[in-house]
Image: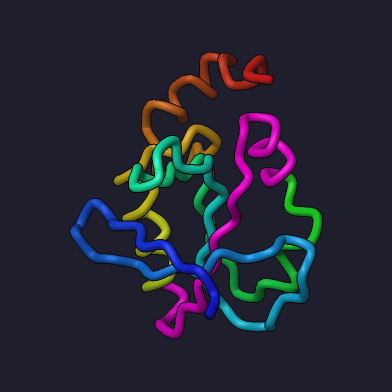
């Protein structure tokens, strides 16, 4: 059985993700993904530091530039979920999660990070 994590969007919708091995093969399906910090306590929350969406995992995931940035910030957990809705619904789900968690590496849909990026603050984060 593949371990799973549930992330809840700002709307209250729950999204069930599988914990994945980033070096494993990817199925050619659309979906959502998140790069996360590990739990600090056994029942503590998992912390997404980047959330994204893709029309095809094998096209987007190998060599994803934010995975390296996320690892430098302490991320060790990669989550992925197949998303069977429309492209618009998938992008709305991504936005829902970004607004809920305010991941450090997301700029799109994440007003505090977008404003910092405009001010040039993000460029010095590493």
Where is residue 2 drawn, in percent x and y? 54, 75
**Residue ID at (74%, 45%):** 65
Q: How many marks?
A: 0
**Residue ID at (36%, 62%):** 6
Indicate yes or no whether the magenta region holds residue 72: yes
Give above or below for 50 relative to 7.
above
Where is residue 34 drawn, in percent x and y? 53, 54
**Residue ID at (50%, 37%):** 107
Where is residue 85 drawn, in percent x and y? 40, 82
Where is residue 20 drawn, in percent x and y? 62, 66
Picture quarter with the C terminus = top right
| Residues drawn in magenta | 66-88
Indicate yes or no whether the magenta region holds residue 83: yes
Display coloring: rainbow
Give above or below for 8 relative to 55.
above
Question: 126 or 41, which is in the foreground?
Answer: 41
Dividing the picture into quarters, in which one does residue 58 lie? bottom right
Question: Which residue is the extreme one toward the front?
Answer: 42
Give above or below for 33 relative to 126.
below
Question: 30 or 35, which is in the foreground?
Answer: 35
**Residue ID at (51%, 40%):** 49
* 81 displayed left or right of 63: left
* 24 displayed left or right of 124: right
* 73 displayed left or right of 31: right
């Amino acid at each position: 059985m593949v371990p799973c994590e549930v992330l809840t969007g700002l709307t209250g919708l729950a999204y069930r993700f599988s914990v994945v091995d980033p070096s494993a093969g990817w199925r050619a399906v659309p979906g959502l993904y998140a790069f996360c910090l590990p739990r600090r306590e056994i029942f503590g929350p998992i912390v997404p530091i980047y959330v994204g969406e893709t029309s095809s995992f094998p096209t987007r995931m190998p060599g994803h530039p934010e995975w390296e940035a996320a690892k430098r910030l302490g991320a060790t957990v990669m989550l992925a979920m197949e998303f069977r809705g429309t492209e618009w619904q998938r992008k709305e789900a991504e936005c829902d999660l970004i607004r809920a968690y305010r991941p450090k590496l997301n700029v799109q849909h994440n007003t505090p990070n977008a404003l910092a990026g405009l001010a040039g603050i993000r460029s010095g984060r590493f």
